[in-house]
Amino acid sequence: MTTTSVPLSWIDEITMEQLERNPYPIYERLRDEAPLAYIPVLGSYVASSAEVCRQVATSPEFQGFIPKTGARIFGHPAIIGSNGDLHKDLRAMIDPGLQPKQVDLYIEDMVRPIARHYIQQFENDGKADLVAQFCEPVSVRAVGDFLGFKDVSSDKLREWFHKLSVSFANVAVDSNGDFANPEGFRPADEAKAEIRAVVEPLLDKWTVEPDDGAISHWLHDGMPEGQVRDRNYIYPTIIALLLGALQEPAHAMASTLAGLFTNPEQLEAVIDEPGLIPRAISEGIRWTSPIWSATARENIQDTTVAGVHLPAGSVVMLSYGSANHDHGLYNAPSEYDLTRPPLPHLAFGAGKHGCAGIYFANTACRIALEELFEAIPNLESDQDRIGFWGWAFRGPESLHSKWEV
Ligand code: 261
């Protein structure tokens, strides 16, 4: 009997379960030993250090690439996987309503009443799970109303993003490169069937009766009189936003609260001085980045990055959640500390595919947390250990909290 004597690397043994429970130890080792490495269970390369993530995200040698699960769920042309003129047109379609000058016109009147509405449901209870009762409902209501889904309940919007998200994270592949768990796409398929049934009549309506919702603008803006964009053209980007845009402000708020719960003096400082909230959020999403490892690039031609030769068409996952814990940049990166020097982080990505919703998300989260701390200044954690989950997307699973009423 002959055996090949190639020793198995620890990298070949990495499992999705490990990554989803706690990716940080594995990634610390990757950053030290192989900041650009091929990970068999993912079927792709991973960029884990701040330098390599930034380089790959911004290099003209690379273009946007939608992870395989995203292509399976969203279809083409989703904005995160589009390039060149197609990507330019999709950005030109979604960017206008997200410019700071525009956002400032509507965000106060939109988010403050939403936050107050959900706080009123639990403020007299003396306890709440702030993920399910505050962060998620506020996030989906704000972004859902912005998009035009005013008549879809917040519970339905939450269900949709959860189903899309769990399937998007179903990235494991077998040794042939096929999905290891094909049944993991069932939640997204269920959500998409419901979404289509809701979206089709709305698109019919907005075609003849445009309103101030973002998707109505996507249909009409920049089109010749009497024409609208093809719905199949905007549909994949609608689904992408029903995942990422609905989910991530919730993660951002929840991780900020979780970080502050690890540091009660800083929680108290932020409640006393609401002007600190933007710093608290910035540190929250550095500490636990919502889009932890869900975007990718591919190189157009053969290239070498961090000493690794990449044949044209290699896929590199951008593990921003790891980049944001890079010891080369941050002192004690696994500690939440809003007083750390304000270095840039990569929670909103970088380059042409950098987050379009950065100002909307930061502002919506700020307003929501202002309302929460104002209403409940004696807020404290009611959990010994806050459980986090996720490798593609990451955040606290729950935030059981209490206060004297
Ligand atoms: C709106 C951006 O949404 C996403 C970003 C990254 C991965 C999946 C997404 O749906």
Image (tube, rainbow, N blue to C red):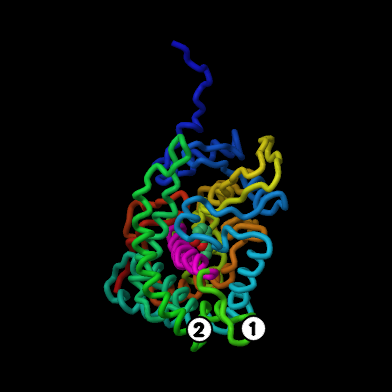
Q: Is label 1 in a helix, a strand or a loop?
A: loop
Horizontally, is 255 left or right of 381 in the view? right
In primary-sequence order, the first of circles 2 and 1 is 2
Q: Where is residue 259 in the image (x, y as percent from the top left)?
A: 46, 57
The numbered dot on residue 207 is 2
Q: Is residue 134 in view from this perspective? A: no
Q: In the orientation shown, which residue stands out farthest toward the left? A: 125
Q: Nearer the viewer, residue 66 or 346?
A: 66
Q: Nearer the viewer, residue 385 or 321?
A: 321
Q: Residue at x 59, y 45 (%)?
A: 315
| Residue span colored magenta | 233-260
109 over 39 or under it: above or below: below
Q: Distance between the residues labelled 2 and 1?
A: 13 Å
Q: Count residues near mark 2 (Cα–Cα under 10 Å), then give few for <14, some for 14-19, many for 20+.
A: some
Horizontally, is 4 left or right of 200 in the view? right
**Residue 327, image quadrant:** top right
Q: Which of 332 and 55 is in front in this view?
A: 55
Give the overall secondary structure of the magenta segment: helix
The numbered dot on residue 224 is 1
**Circles 2 and 1: CB distance less than 8 Å?**
no
Q: Residue at x 52, y 37 (%)?
A: 39
Q: Which amino acid does label 1 sit on?
A: Pro
Q: Is residue 140 in view from this perspective? A: yes
